[in-house]
Image: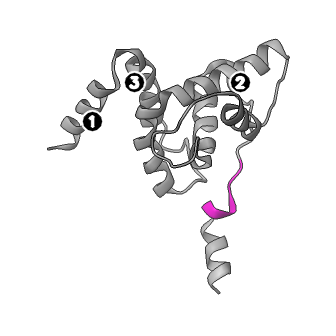
Amino acid sequence: MDKESSEQLKLDWIGSNNLKGYSKLKNVMDNDPYLFDGLTKDREKKFKAWLPDNMHIYDAFIKFANELKWLNNRKYYSARAIWERLRWESMLQDTDSDCKISDLNMPFVSWLSMEAEPGLKGMFKKRRSKMDDPDYHEAVKG
């Protein structure tokens, strides 16, 4: 099966509820090759495969971020704090993980949300993890 057919099957499987939301996010990611610059390409690839099946987590993250922004008048906030709130205050489950919601996708969700959701632009700091820094791995080996 070619890549386009595989992608279409995935889109069909997602269902109509999340199709429009995922399509919007996919367009954002496809139109900005530097969106996740600073994070590893391997993790980016895994995130892009994870997202279609986990739009419920993205949507909940957006809901909590908007609550903070508009109801609590927060100009900036911690994406990690929102992610932990998702873990503790919801019954959401990550489809690709043994744990409730994996940390691995949090930076991607927060960076994508700032690009895809105009009201959240600039709300989170873009930080690179040591684990995403190739120089860190060289220093540990050496």
Location of residue 26 in the rendering, given as x and y in whole percent from the top left corner: 42, 31
Q: Residue at x 78, y 21 (%)?
A: 68
Q: In the image, what residue type sits under mark 3?
A: Ser
Q: CA distance from mark 2 to mark 3?
A: 21 Å
Location of residue 126 in the rendering, given as x and y in whole percent from the top left corner: 70, 44
Would you say 15 lies left or right of 66 here? Answer: left
Specify how the rendered protein is coloured: one colour
Q: In the image, what residue type sits under mark 1?
A: Glu
The quarter in which the N terminus is drawn is top left
Residue 106 figure quarter: top right
Q: CA distance from mark 3 to mark 1?
A: 11 Å
Would you say 88 lies left or right of 16 here? Answer: right
Is mark 2 in CB contact (under 8 Å) with mark 3?
A: no
Q: In this rendering, does residue 78 appear at all? A: yes
The residue identified by callout 3 is: 23
Query: Magenta region: which residues?
Result: 127-132
Q: In the image, what residue type sits under mark 2?
A: Ala
The residue identified by callout 1 is: 7
Residue 129 included in the magenta stretch of the image: yes
Q: Is residue 103 above or below residue 133?
A: above
Would you say 100 lies left or right of 51 here? Answer: right
76 or 62: nearer the viewer: 62
Q: Which mark is residue 83?
A: none
The residue identified by callout 2 is: 65
Pick whichever of labels 2 and 3 is earlier in the sequence: 3
Q: Tell me the SS state at disc 3.
A: helix
31 or 73: nearer the viewer: 73
Is mark 3 in CB contact (under 8 Å) with mark 1?
A: no
Residue ranking furthest to the bottom:
142
Residue ranking furthest to the left:
1
Q: CA distance from mark 1 to mark 2?
A: 29 Å
Q: Is residue 120 above or below residue 1?
A: above
